[in-house]
Amino acid sequence: MKEGIHPNYREVAFQDMSSDVVFIIRSTIETRDKVTVDGKEYPLVKLEVTADSHPFYTGKHKIVDTAGRVEKFRQKFGKLGSKTAAAGA
């Protein structure tokens, strides 16, 4: 391999800011922050949402009732915006 053309691939600590969970994986990302985990210093990347705090993965996601929204729209506007009503006219 040629010298000086490859990014620095090393262990990096990623921290979920909403749950304060830190996990370490290998990455080439550049960062200015550092953190010490288990006595070893790692470059630190701060994340807003990870699988540890995302509502879909934690089971706290909100199910959207799209059928109810469609019915509410139809009750409010009736056949005014319907393609079938325009085609029949």
Image (cartoon, rainbow, N blue to C red):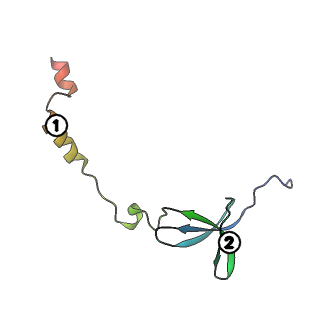
Asked if residue 85 is positioned above or below residue 72 in the image, the reply reads: above
Q: Which mark is residue 74?
A: 1
For the residues labelled 1 and 2, say whether their Cβ atoms are less than 8 Å apart: no
**Between 32 and 3, the one nearer to me in the picture:** 32
Q: Left or right: 31 with respect to 60?
A: right
Foreground: disc 1 or disc 2: 2
Res 74 quadrant in image: top left
Residue sitting at x 67%, y 82%: 39
Disc 2: which residue = 42
Which is more N-terminal, label 2 or label 1?
Answer: 2
- How many circles with numbers are drawn on the protein? 2
Q: Residues within 10 Å of mark 1 (few under 14, many from 20)?
A: some
Q: Left or right: 15 with respect to 54?
A: right
Name the image quarter holding the C terminus.
top left
Res 57 quadrant in image: bottom left
Q: Secondary structure at mark 1?
A: helix
**Residue 68 spot, x, y in % from top left:** 19, 47
Q: Residues within 10 Å of mark 2 (few under 14, many from 20)?
A: some
Q: Secondary structure at mark 2?
A: strand
Report the amino acid beneath label 2: Tyr
**Residue 33 spot, x, y in % from top left:** 65, 67
Residue at the far front: name it. 32
Residue at the far top: name it. 89
Residue sitting at x 16%, y 24%: 85
Name the image quarter holding the N terminus.
bottom right
Cα distance, mark 1 to mark 2?
A: 56 Å
Report the amino acid beneath label 1: Arg
